Amino acid sequence: MVPHPSRARAVQVTHETEQPFPGASDVEVTRVASAPPSPTRVQGNCAEAEGGNCRGAARKPRARRGGRSRPKSELALSKQRRSRRKKANDRERNRMHNLNSALDALRGVLPTFPDDAKLTKIETLRFAHNYIWALTQTLRIADHSLYGLEPPAPSCEELGSPDDGSPGDWSSLYSPVSQAGSLSPAASLEECPGLQAPASPACLRPGALALSDFL
DNA sequence: TAGGCCATCTGGTCCT
DNA sequence: AGGACCAGATGGCCTA
């Protein structure tokens, strides 16, 4: 999907996202950015799981230990639950704000036209993925020319696509627009004269390539 | 009005 | 126990 200029919303980015990783320590940011979900946490579809307990199926049943704390009245329990929920909501909101801040930072280093509408989340991720791939190819070409080798004239097959390395769902994440796009990143590189030896990153400047080339 | 995108709430699970 | 993470649900805003 092509971002529409008028899609900008009044409440798109909260005040917390206006500064780099606000309210998040480096540790938090690193954790958010780098912590892959542990294999044990990969979740399937819980729809058929009774009571939403699909992940608990492989879990040891928790031993109940009672009697340590004072029995609380229903009112006190309810108040405690509400308080915990409220705190959890705040944390969750913060977490999502941090995630959005990271996405904003990512948008910030991606080449876009100033008047481009803000990339959506999925567009940002796809763009970044393809952009990194394009830069990698640029470096490869630069290396070849540096060592006096013939600049490779990679076929599209040789170049592969930015999706090659990911057996996952990257290709399925492609939007209909990008799937129907006229230029793949590989084609864009080949068509960019600056990428013939010596390779020139100038081709990766905004304007050299259309945004849609990377999406 | 339908569909896309988003923020938020919520409950479950896992980890420390 | 409490925090982090996740996915589903919900509702608002916007555009075609």
Image (cartoon, coloured by chain):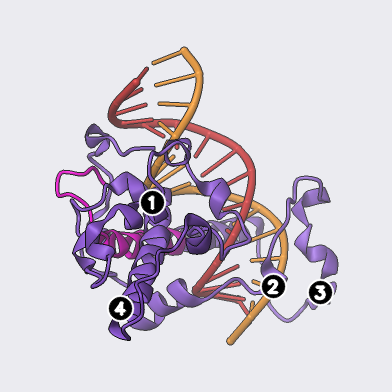
Chain colours: A purple, B orange, C red
Q: Which residue is mark 1?
A: A187
Lateral position of residue A122 relative to residue A202, left or right: right
Determine the residue positioned at 35% across, 60% down.
Answer: A103
Instruction: Say if mark 4 contacts mark 1, CB within 8 Å.
Output: no
Which of the 4 image quarters holds residue C9?
top right
Determine the residue positioned at 29% across, 48% down.
Answer: A211
Determine the residue positioned at 31% across, 63% down.
Answer: A106
Span highlighted in magenta in the image: A91-118
Q: Which residue is mark 2?
A: A39
Classified by dominant secondary structure, the portion drawn in magenta counts as: helix
Percent coordinates x, y for residue A203 in the rendering = 22, 60
Discs 1/3, front: 1
Please check the rendered image and state whether residue A65 is part of the magenta-colored stretch, yes or no: no
Instruction: State which tag comes first along the sequence, 2 or 4.
Output: 2
The answer for how far apart the CA atoms under marks 4 and 1 are is: 20 Å
Instruction: State which tag comes first along the sequence, 1 or 2.
Output: 2
* Mark 4: amino acid: Ser
